[in-house]
Image: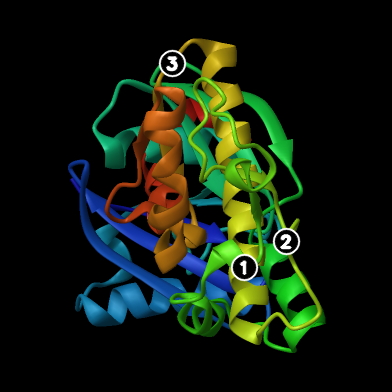
Amino acid sequence: MGITVGLDIGGSTTKIVGMKEHKVIYKEIIKADDPVTSAYGALGKLINDNSLSVKDIDRVNITGVGAAFPDGDLLGIKTVIITEFLSTGLGGLYISGLDRAVVVSMGTGTAYLDASYDHVRHIIGSGVGGGTIVGLCNAMVGIEDPEKLSDVAFDADIRKVDLTIGDISKAEIPGLPMDVTASNFGKAEDDLSKQEKIAGVFNLVYQSIGTMAVLSSRNCGCKDVVFTGQLTTLKQCRMYLSLFGNLYDVNIIIPENAEYATAIGACLAGDENER
């Protein structure tokens, strides 16, 4: 049995995964100026890094927003386009070890999926995601690199930015701790530091994603919520999303290799998903 390759092709970044007998044997992220270059570059790097030949690869399953750009078979290897929601759903289940879950794909925007190995259903989507972080922070402080933004804001005091329940009420509200956010940026003043502004954006985005994830969980009656995508790699992800677990009685799961979930799912998808 040969290797199956999954390519999650973005506008300029491609995540590549190689699997053999349903085990991940290779993973990498490749950046290039366009999706075709990044796709060919990723496949070539996999072959080179593992001392493979083209004949060692059974098929290449491609997905993502840039999947339609490569024309025909890549390097002469059978190449199949797999729908992105199916890929993300299957990948989220694989990396979490679950048979059913709400799978949240955090990319430029965010998608919420009711996923099982029998069926993947798109629940709803949101325009709030990584693009929101990059765009707002670039407009506010002139920085657009996500990892740099994460590092700069990590130790900032979010209490100087967001209004909490305790700020507006002296009496406790059943089910809502006093430190829960009542209004994102509701306490922001003119003298906010760069670090505090960025922290406020991160909290706004992750809380919006977390809230939609809880609603999606209740919509399909599944408490297991698996988060995937590049935003899972930033320090603020676990910090802000973990709070939703106890607050709303859901299981917040951010597995290892969550940024590769869609590429992994593309590997797992079979011939019946060709289009």
Residue 229 in percent (x, y) is at: 49, 54
Q: Is mark 1 on a helix, strand or loop?
A: helix
- Count neighbours of disc 1 (C-alpha within 10 A) and say few if under 14, some if 14 to 19, many if 20 or more: some
Check disc 2 and report the residue beneath it. Answer: 187
Q: Can residue 269 be seen in this view?
A: no
Q: Nearer the viewer, mark 3 or mark 2?
A: 2
Q: What element carries label 3?
A: loop
Tell me: 95 left or right of 79: left
Answer with mark 1 or mark 2, whichever residue precedes in sequence.
1
State the colouring used for the structure image.
rainbow
Check disc 3 and report the residue beneath it. Answer: 222
Which residue is depicted at the point 59% across and 23% down? 216
Real-space Cα distance between discs 3 and 2?
35 Å
Three-letter residue code for mark 1:
Lys
Three-letter residue code for mark 2:
Lys
Residue 72 in percent (x, y) is at: 62, 58
Tell me: 186 left or right of 103: right
Which residue is depicted at the point 58% across and 70% down? 199
- Count neighbours of disc 2 (C-alpha within 10 A) and say few if under 14, some if 14 to 19, many if 20 or more: some
> Marks 3 and 1: in contact by CB < 8 Å?
no
